[in-house]
Image: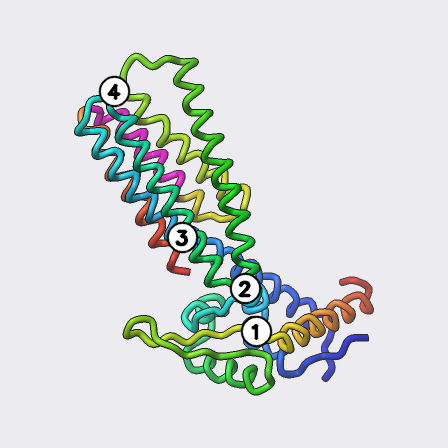
C-alpha cells in the first residue's frame, strides 16, 4: 500500500501541488497560484516555503522589466510524492468499497 | 496519520477541481496573445475594407492574413520556448491543427460564396465574422472553455446587430465590434 504524505495532505498544499502537477513542469506565477487555489498572500507564501523545504517545489524570483516576479514549479521529487499520495488516497477509497 | 475514506474522497475532489482549473487557465493564457493579434488584424482588415472598393478586398486581406499567420507562429514558438521541449512539441502540434482548421474554414467560406453567389458585398463582410463566432462557440462547448463560448456569442450578436441596423457603416462596425471583441476577449483570458 502507498504511504500518506503529511506535508502534501494539508488542504492548501494539496491544491498547490495539484495546480503545479497540472502545469506539467511549467512554472506558475504567485498571482496565478493564488487565483487557482483561493489562497491569500500570507498563507500562500508560508505553504510554498513548507513545500520548498521538503524539496517538492522550486521557487524562482526574477524581474520582468521592473516588476518583481515569483514563480513556483514542481520538482521531480514533488511529482513522485504527489502521485504517491494520490495513490494512497485512491487505495483508501477502494478499501472502503469504492465510495 | 489516519485518513478516512470521506476525507480521501474530498481530497481527490479538490485535486480534480484544481487540476481542471489549472488546465483551463493554461489554455486561456496560451490563447490570449493570439486573440489580441487576430483582433488587431481583424480591425485593420475591416477598416481597410470600408475604405476600399470590394474588388480590392483580396489585396487588403491576403497580406494581413499572412501577417497574422506569421505572428501566430512566432507566438507559438515563444510559448513553446517558455515551456521547454514538451511545450515546443505541443506548440508544433497546435500550430499544425490551427493551420488545418484555418485552411478548412477558408475553403468552406470560399465554397459557400461560389455556391450562393452573393449579389451584394454585405455577405462577404458578415459571413466570415459569423463563422468565426460559431467556431468560438463550438470550441468553448467542446473543450469546456466557457470564455470562448461567451466571446463567440458576443461576436455573433454584435455582427448580426450590425447587419440588421448599421449597414451603411458595416465594415467599420465589424472592425470595432469584432476586432475590439477579440482584443477584449484576449485581455479577459489573461485574468485567470
Q: Which mark identifies residue B161?
A: none
Element marked by disc 4:
helix
Q: Does the CB distance between marks 1 and 2 fall below 8 Å?
A: yes
The answer for which chain carries disc 1 is A
- Label 3 to label 4, Cα distance in Å? 32 Å
Is B188 above or below relative to B163?
below
According to the picture, the residue beneath numbered tag 2 turns out to be A23
Q: Is residue A91 magenta?
A: no
Q: Is residue B188 above or below residue A15?
A: above
Q: Are marks 1 and 3 on the same chain?
A: no
Q: Earlier in the sequence, mark 1 or mark 2?
A: 2
Whole-angstrom CA distance, mark 3 to mark 2, is 19 Å
The label nearer to you, 4 versus 2, is 4
The Cα–Cα distance between marks 1 and 4, rounded to whole angstroms, is 56 Å
Q: Which of pointers 3 and 4 lies earlier in the amino acid sequence?
A: 4
Magenta highlight range: B151-167
- Point out the frontmost of discs 1 and 3: 3
Q: Quadrant of the N terminus of chain B?
A: bottom right
The image quadrant that residue A98 belongs to is bottom right
Left or right placement of residue B18 versus residue A67 in this view: right
Residue located beneath label 4 in the image: B55
Q: Is residue B77 left or right of residue A11?
A: left
Which of the numbered marks, if any, corresponds to residue B75? Answer: 3
Instruction: Give me the chain letter of mark 2.
Output: A
* Residue B145 location (% of width, % of height): 49, 48
Q: Kindly report the secondary structure that dominates the magenta region of the rendered protein.
A: helix
* Mark 3 belongs to chain: B
Q: Which residue is mark 1?
A: A74
Q: Nearer the viewer, residue B107 or B189?
A: B107
Amino acid at each position: 500500500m502507498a504511504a500518506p504524505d503529511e506535508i502534501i495532505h494539508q488542504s492548501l498544499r494539496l491544491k498547490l501541488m495539484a495546480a503545479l502537477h497540472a502545469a506539467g513542469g511549467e512554472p506558475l506565477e504567485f498571482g496565478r497560484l493564488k487565483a487557482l487555489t483561493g489562497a491569500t498572500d500570507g498563507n500562500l507564501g508560508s505553504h510554498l516555503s513548507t513545500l520548498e523545504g521538503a524539496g517538492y517545489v522550486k521557487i524562482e524570483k526574477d524581474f520582468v522589466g521592473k516588476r518583481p516576479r515569483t514563480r513556483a514549479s514542481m520538482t521531480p521529487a514533488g511529482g513522485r510524492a504527489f502521485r504517491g499520495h494520490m495513490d494512497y488516497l485512491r487505495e483508501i477509497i477502494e478499501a472502503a468499497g469504492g465510495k | 496519520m489516519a485518513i478516512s475514506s470521506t476525507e480521501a474522497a474530498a481530497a481527490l475532489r479538490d485535486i480534480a477541481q484544481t487540476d481542471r482549473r489549472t488546465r483551463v487557465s493554461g489554455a486561456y493564457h496560451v490563447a490570449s496573445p493570439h486573440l489580441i493579434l487576430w483582433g488587431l488584424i481583424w480591425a485593420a482588415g475591416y477598416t481597410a475594407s470600408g475604405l476600399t472598393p470590394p474588388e480590392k478586398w483580396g489585396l487588403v486581406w491576403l497580406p494581413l492574413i499572412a501577417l497574422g499567420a506569421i505572428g501566430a507562429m512566432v507566438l507559438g514558438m515563444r510559448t513553446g520556448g517558455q515551456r521547454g521541449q514538451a511545450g515546443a512539441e505541443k506548440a508544433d502540434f497546435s500550430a499544425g491543427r490551427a493551420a488545418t482548421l484555418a485552411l478548412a474554414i477558408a475553403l468552406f467560406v470560399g465554397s459557400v460564396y461560389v455556391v450562393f453567389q452573393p449579389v451584394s458585398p454585405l455577405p462577404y463582410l458578415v459571413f466570415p465574422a459569423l463563422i468565426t463566432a460559431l467556431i468560438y462557440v463550438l470550441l468553448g462547448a467542446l473543450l469546456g472553455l466557457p470564455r470562448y463560448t461567451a466571446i463567440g456569442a458576443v461576436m455573433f450578436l454584435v455582427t448580426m446587430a450590425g447587419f440588421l441596423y448599421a449597414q451603411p457603416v458595416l465594415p467599420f462596425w465589424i472592425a470595432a465590434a469584432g476586432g475590439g471583441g477579440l482584443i477584449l476577449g484576449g485581455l479577459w483570458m489573461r485574468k485567470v
